[in-house]
Amino acid sequence: MSAHGHVDLGHTVAGWTGTTLALLGFAGAGAAVCAAWPPGILIGLAVVALAGVVTWLLHLAGWGKPSGPRPEAEWDWRVRDTAAHAGHADCLGCRAGGPRRAVAAARPRPAVPLPAAGEGA
């Protein structure tokens, strides 16, 4: 049980990788600002942009998650989303991935009951 209760926070390989790269890019750009090194600022900002692209590509490869809660068996951050090859319904990232992903298979996901406020603490 986490400190946040019994909920799906959406930790994924794509999310952790993108967040780590963005943090490194921001830290590098910040250090370059302090050092007054303009090329370092551009390098740091390029790493931040790269973080977005890497996160998107990992999401398209199935290492992200669709919107909304997932079944409890899929909460581990190392679980790959097998439905990602067709794209997720109402997902901007999947629609940006091309026309074959834009027409996402509208498969209903299993309902996941969420605990009421104060439960599961």
Image (cartoon, grey):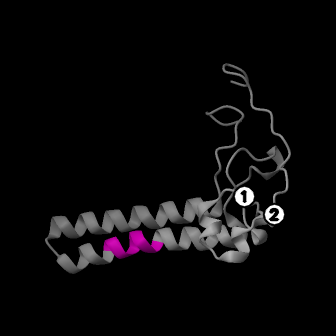
* The one of 111 and 95 positioned closer to us in this rendering: 95
Label 1 to label 2: alpha-carbon separation: 7 Å
Mainly helix, strand or loop, the magenta region? Answer: helix
Instruction: Name the side, left or right, on which 103 lies relative to 21.
Output: right
In which quadrant is the N terminus drawn?
Answer: top right
Identify whether 36 is placed above or below 2.
below
Please state the horizontal and vertical placement of residue 96, each as a whole percent of the image.
59, 71
Asked which quadrant contains residue 43, the reply is bottom left
User: Which range is magenta?
Assistant: 44-50
Q: Which residue is mark 1?
A: 89
Identify whether 118 is placed above or below 37.
above
Q: Which mark is residue 105?
A: 2
Rate crowding at label 2 as few (under 14), some (14 to 19) or many (20 or more) other CA atoms within 10 Å.
Answer: some
**Measuring 85% from the left and 51% from the top, which residue is drawn there?**
108
Please state the horizontal and vertical placement of residue 110, each as a whole percent of the image.
86, 45
- Is residue 46 highlighted in magenta? yes
- Identity, as a three-letter code, of the amino acid under mark 2: Ala
CB atoms of marks 1 and 2 within 8 Å: yes
Identify whether 10 is placed above or below 113.
below
Asked which quadrant contains residue 81, the reply is bottom right
Instruction: Name the side, left or right, on which 70 lies relative to 11.
Output: right
- Is residue 38 highlighted in magenta? no
**Measuring 49% from the left and 60% from the top, which residue is drawn there?**
19
Residue furthest to the left in view is 36
Residue furthest to the top in view is 118
- Identity, as a three-letter code, of the amino acid under mark 1: Ala
Please state the horizontal and vertical placement of residue 65, each as a whole percent of the image.
69, 57
**Measuring 70% from the left and 55% from the top, which residue is drawn there?**
66
Q: Which mark is residue 46?
A: none
* Pointer 1 or 2: first along the chain: 1
